[in-house]
Image: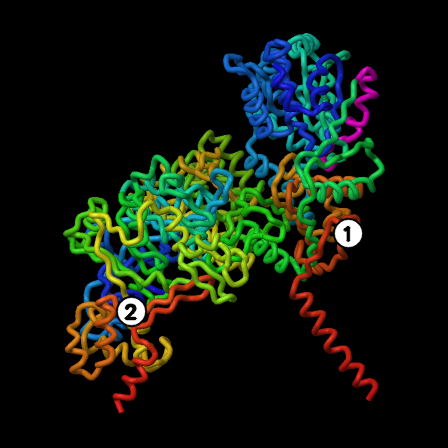
Amino acid sequence: MTSLLSSLNQSQRTAVQTIEGPLLIIAGAGTGKTRTLVHRLAYLVAEKEIPPEKLLAITFTTRAAEEMRERVGGLCQEGIDLSSLWVGTIHALCYQILKNEGCAVRFVPDFEIISPTDQAGIIRILAKQFFPQQLPISIKHYALKISREKNELAGLHTSPAGFSPFCQAYQEILERETLLDFDDLIVKTVLLLKKFPDITKQLRSRFSHISVDEYQDINTAQYLLIRELAGPAPNLCAVGDADQAIYAFRGAQVKNFLNFQHDFPQAAIIRLEENYRSTSTIITAARQVIEKNSARIDKKLIAVKPRGPRIELCEMLDEREEARFVAQEIGRLIGGTSFETLGPARDDAGLPAMGFGDIAVLYRLHAQSRYLKKALELAGIPVEIGTSLSLYEEPEVEAVINVLEAMHNPENDFAVSEILQNSVKGIGPKTVTLLRNRAQELNTPLLETIRLKNNFTKIAADKCAALGAFLDMHNECIERSSQIPLDQLIKEIYEKLCKQAVQSQEGKNNSIADNENLLDLITASLPFSPVPASEGIPLFLNKISRLREGETYSRHREAVTLLTVHGAKGLEFPAVFITGLEDGLFPYNANSDSGEEADPEEERRLFYVGMTRAQEKLYLTWAHSRFLFGERKSLPRSTFIADIPEETACCYIDPVIKKRTQEKQAKKPKQMNLFSD
Amino acid sequence: MNLENIYKWAQLKGITVVATGDFTHPAWFAELKEKLEPAEPGLFQIKKRYVHEVEKEIPESCRAPVRFLLSVEISTIYKKGDRTRKIHTIFLSPDFVSAGTLNASLQECGNIKSDGRPILGMDSKLLLQMALDASSDNTCIPAHIWTPHFSVLGAASGFDSVEECFEDLTPHIFALETGLSSDPPMNWQISQLDRFVLVSNSDAHSPGKLGREANIFDCDLSYFAMMRALKEKDHRQFLGTLEFFPEEGKYHYDGHRNCNSRMAPEETLSHNGDCPVCGRKVTVGVMHRVTNLSDRNAGFRPQQAFPFHNLIPLSEVLAEVNSVGANSKKVSQQYFKLLEKFGSEFYVLRDCPLSDFKQEGFGLLAEALQRIREGRVNISPGYDGAYGIIKVFEPWEKQENQLSLF
């Protein structure tokens, strides 16, 4: 078993071998945190012969869980069965506990997890009701509001009485449909464990060793859950880095991390300080940046790698130039994407040509991604956006698919109400609710209810006309579906929707040729278009539902990753661009109404996280002006830039800026002359 | 480029089956679906109503049926064996379903809407798998296989063998495109390529450049017959290729442009890769890569090799004969005059009796064409970014000729 430890450094080895009692591993960026955790699990199983089912490893994401399980398996000898090893997110754990124990004692009904689409739908309806004056509605904003309320309440109350009316209404809908959202999973588990000590006892005896990754980012509810599971004298290993705590806006409390010693006075503390990820150039700069913070556990970060290419500080005219520059540099990093852009690879840095997957472009806000994505795609660079809408979530595509869904299954009330609400002019959530209630009374599907038209006295004449138009459209589509192939039907549906829809209000150009999403949808339908649409629709809908579950060829593709800095947590890339480094944007200075309070220290931690994602090459870019949230803003250069030590950086100035400055300078003496004349 | 123009230029050039290109592009795909109709199996013709206008611009002497074949060239950029690979491949489809299904799969993996060649961040082998999943009738041909940066055998970001790239799917590949930068004799030096049939395409980005290189078939007019002829290496049905002079390419030989040192690969090797003028490493060209992978001497001809013929585009021949630019008005006038009198460009270049030209007062052209047909031309290979120069006449010859005209 020496081989298991031989590849570790001294502090990693100590961390792996410390298996009794509470342990806090303070692991700086790129210091082999996951590696240490993985080895620790393998050590427990293979060396200490602890049965795998007694181990619980909590990760921050599902992806991290999959990776961890795979790597532990790789370290253990063949023949050791790890299937009972519990590796997963806190949510997955709670789901299991609730499904197994919670349902058995009837603490929760046999629930389902609400889908993001349905959750968005409910929030949209409720937000319109409760906050009619606040338009447009940011679903994300309200979802966060609900999430925070739930998590804050977890420790205090057991009933939803303490909820705001909005949150309460939301909760009632969920309960009626026996749905739980992600926050419910944790909150309800905490409540379950508090109420049923037997279950708690049983879980505590099942898991003898618990490890929790990213401990700095757990919120109150998660903290309470871990304390419940761990008990008073646990073999609990918490791993994290207070310098990388970036989820305060979701209720995460870095104080949970800082308080670990207070919670467990007997805790051992081990520091991992050798960074294997980044060049010493990048580490030197990152250290300078983070040392300006005061709420820290002091620790070192020592680069193992030698110096690398300097960090490029890039001053751009505006967001277009910035995006164009990023595309151009990516072309350079991979050594040219086509004959036309073929240039020398970065010979200045001596780096070998990179692949698309080696490169990430980070930004503070999602809103910045739109332009970057466009510019990169225009340059023919494949792009992967972490959490962007997939094609099937784009509103106009969703609208067309809903029509197809309703044609395929007239009893699909969800599709019908979505069409009514989003695509039929004059029909709002009130009418839809009215109709849904009526359908429930009659015990008939929604579409049938509309067709029967009885007892519509509460519905105004113009709305009845709109409903009539909707029915006509539905019927026409059914008729056409036996005559034309699917790709053509999709075109016709889109044209019909445009005619009567809300979408046309915005004065948007609705021609299909200009709508890239629609063109994509038509391309996707091609394999199902050699037969009449009526035969193609079920096959196509089936394909879409498989795609939604992630069964696509795209798993195998390499692309430049576009991510928020938050989303980049835990990842690493040979080359990283951090864009939009302007005061107000990064560090972000939230408007008072957005609900996101910015903490300057958290912003700095976030920047630190971004910088330490880079292995070889780091670009920091800012623009003189930027179009964001409907207006052009000119923000000063980010204060972070001044913290990058001179000897680690080099500057690049947008040629357009140079040209403009030259022009200005050329003009100046002339004006002087005019005056002196 | 639009279909009408391709239709016109195919006839001017003397091409019967022309590839559409770019079928992954949604707007172009829609146009193809709109304007084309099925003709012989796997081939399409343009609908009559779209060609009324353009028909008038085609000389009577050149008119001939034109068939379209669905095609696309796709660029993949990906990592394999820790190196960044950049490979271009051509895909051919016999029908819109086979092509459209491939489009739908590709769309899941990336952006196929950008203008120009779609770039996908995926393994070429997986791309081939997707094309075959879409339809077993789809054909994959690795493109211009010697281009340093974008090809399966390219020096900078390719592989050392076709198998390394496509692995167990290699048997599905039966043809390789030599590209403008190589001709069959270069490929004959490498025994691992014997298995494949070498084809040539124009890589045209404007209709006037169609037919720069071409394949000669004598088989049934059908996609399937053409593919079968290639697959079975049928010497009666596939007659070989028309080729550019690869020496014209900017990176044929090795050398330093600024030092005026142009070297064949053997010379470079004897200089240890250094420039004899400045002593630094020379820029290595396409031929060098061929030499590196070759296991036979130059001049070897495999038994089953197909014939090939070198061509110089007619406009370039006319430019030289007249000592004017290839885009000049004079060249264009003579070009169309010749086509009207004798027939398509291929006919003029290859088949038209030389005596006919002489009768019509094109004596010097007749001489030029005779030399080209016999392969007697002066070649100065390109190197380090400098285009190669192919000349039919020595400078003094033309002076003399012109003098003699007076």
Q: Specify the quadrant of the image occupied by residue A86.
A: top right
**Mark identifier at residue B175:** none
Report whether residue A493 is seen.
Answer: no
Mark 1 falls on what kind of element? helix
Coloring applied to the structure: rainbow
Front residue of A85/A80: it is: A80
- At x 19%, y 63%, the residue is B65
Q: Residue at x 44, y 63 (%)?
A: B262
Asked if labels 2 and 1 share a chain, the reply is no
Amino acid at the residue labelled 1: Glu
Chain under numbered label 2? B
- x%, y% of residue A187? 68, 23
**Residue picked out by circle 1:** A646
Q: Is B170 situated above or below A60?
A: below
The image quadrant where one finds the N terminus of chain B is: bottom left
Q: Nearer the viewer, mark 2 or mark 1?
A: 2
Q: Does B140 appear above or below A73? A: below
Q: Quadrant of residue B125?
A: top left
Tell me the magenta residue range: A246-267
Residue lying furthest bottom: B406
Q: Position of residue B360 (x, y in %)?
A: 18, 83
Q: Residue at x 51, y 54 (%)?
A: A336
The residue indicated by pointer 2 is B377
- Is A596 positioned to the left or the right of B2 in the image? right
**Residue in the foreground of this view, choosing between B290 and A348:** B290
Badge 1 sits on which subunit? A
Asked whether A254 falls inside the magenta stretch, the response is: yes
Between the C-alphas of marks 2 and 1, the distance is 60 Å
Q: Amino acid at mark 2?
A: Val
